[in-house]
Image: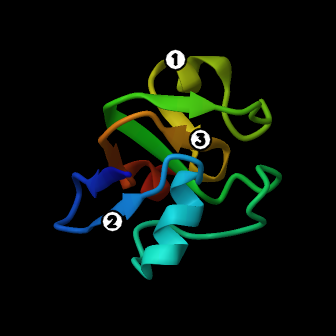
């Protein structure tokens, strides 16, 4: 189990090893970022990994470019934490 903390607020939740950041947030009943299709097709749950490591599943380049991914931007529905993670959702305002 890993702690996921939002640096833009005081919000956090515990994410299980096998669940995505989005699934963990939903299970914990915490609202940190918008939820869309839950499968990577809409790009709504885009967040930036500020600290920590995540295991990534394939993400649509329509929603996350290679440059964005290299900068830590991911879809929360397509990543699983490998340890404690700090995220930023400030990028939501830039879309």
Place of residue 93 in the rendered image (x, y in percent of width and height, measured from the top left): 44, 58
Cα separation, mark 3 vs mark 2, equals 15 Å
- Residue drawn at x 41%, y 28% as measured from the top left: 53
Query: Which quadrant of the structure image shows residue 12?
Result: bottom left
Q: Secondary structure at mark 3?
A: strand
Foreground pick, 29 / 75? 29
For the point 56% across and 38% down, which residue is it? Answer: 74
Q: Earlier in the sequence, mark 1 or mark 3?
A: 1
Residue that protrudes farthest toward the left in the picture:
10
Does the residue at mark 3 contact the one at mark 2 (Cβ under 8 Å)? no
Q: Give the distance between the C-alpha atoms of the residues marked 1 and 3, in whole angstroms.
A: 14 Å
Report the residue marked by disc 2.
13
Please, is residue 82 above or below residue 44 in the view? above
SS state under label 1: helix
Q: Earlier in the sequence, mark 1 or mark 2?
A: 2
Depicted 64 relative to depicted 11: above or below: above
First reached walking from the N terminus: tag 3 or tag 2: 2
Residue to which mark 3 is pinned:
79
CA–CA distance between discs 1 and 2?
A: 25 Å
């Amino acid at each position: 189990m890993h702690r996921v903390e939002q640096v833009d607020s005081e919000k956090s939740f515990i994410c299980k090893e096998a669940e995505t950041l989005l699934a963990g947030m939903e299970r914990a009943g915490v609202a940190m970022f918008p939820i869309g299709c839950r499968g990577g097709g809409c790009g709504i749950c885009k967040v930036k990994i500020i600290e920590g490591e995540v295991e990534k599943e394939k993400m649509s380049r329509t929603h996350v470019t290679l440059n964005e991914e290299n900068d830590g931007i991911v879809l929360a529905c397509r990543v699983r934490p490998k340890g404690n993670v700090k995220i930023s959702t400030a990028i939501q305002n830039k879309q």
